[in-house]
Amino acid sequence: GPNLGTDVLYSGTVSAAVEGIINGIPSLAVSLATHQEPDFSWAVRFVLDLLPEFTRQVVPTGTLLNINVPPGVPRGVRVTKLGNIRYVNVVDIRTDPRGRAYFWMAGEPLELGGDDPDTDVRAVKDGFISITPVQIDLTDYLFMEKLKKWSLPWSREELVGKRHPGASAGVN
C-alpha cells in the first residue's frame, strides 16, 4: 500500500530504507499507492530508469527517497513534500496465537492532504509518481532553541537530594 504523508512515520517500508541510511547505504523506499491487487510493472520500470541517476547523484547523508507509484499508468513524476493524512480510527481488540490481547488500529482516511499541489498525497491522487526526500532527523531545531529558554522542572540543581520515586526509604 501507499506510504504517503505522515504515514511514513509508521511505515515498515520507509523504516527499512532508514536502516539502510543509518548504515551508510543510499536508500529508496518504493510503494504502490493501492490496496487492490498489486501490479508492480510501472514501479519496477520507474525504479530501473531512476537507478542510473540515483547512483550518479549525491543524496545527503541521513536522507532517503520515498517513492509512491499511483495505480494504473502514471501521468509523470513530481518531486514532493510530505502531505498530511488523518484517519477516522477504529480500534479492534484481537487475540494473538498465544492468547494475548492486542490492539489493531485501522480506519478510513478523513483528510487526504488538502489541495497543496506540492504534497506526495496530492501528486499520487492526481496520478503522478511522487518522490519525496525524507530526513531521519525529526528534530525541530528552531523550537529547540526556544525550549532551552523554558523554566523546566527538575533542573540539575533541583534534582540534588531528591530520591528516586521507586527507591525504598532512606536510599537516595
Image: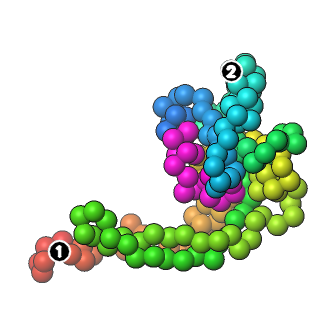
Residue highlighted by disc 2 = 55
Nearer the observer, 94 or 158:
94
Q: Is residue 103 above or below residue 43?
A: below
Nearer the observer, 41 or 167:
41
Prevailing SS of the magenta stretch: helix
Please say whether residue 12 is one of the residues in the magenta stretch.
Answer: yes
- Determine the residue positioned at 82% across, 41% down: 73
Residue highlighted by disc 1 = 167
Q: Are marks 2 and 1 in contact (CB under 8 Å)?
A: no
- Residue kind at label 1, given as amino acid type: Ala
The answer to whether residue 161 shows anywhere in this view is no
Question: Label 2's element?
Answer: helix
Task: Specify the farthest residue to the front.
Answer: 37
Q: Magenta segment, which residues? A: 1-18
The answer to whether residue 87 shows anywhere in this view is yes
Q: Is residue 145 above or below residue 110?
A: above
Mark closer to the chain start, 2 or 1: 2
Quadrant location of residue 59? Answer: top right
Q: Is residue 108 left or right of residue 92?
A: right
Q: Residues within 10 Å of mark 2 (few under 14, many from 20)?
A: few
Q: Is residue 97 left or right of residue 54?
A: left
Please say whether residue 161 is one of the residues in the magenta stretch.
Answer: no
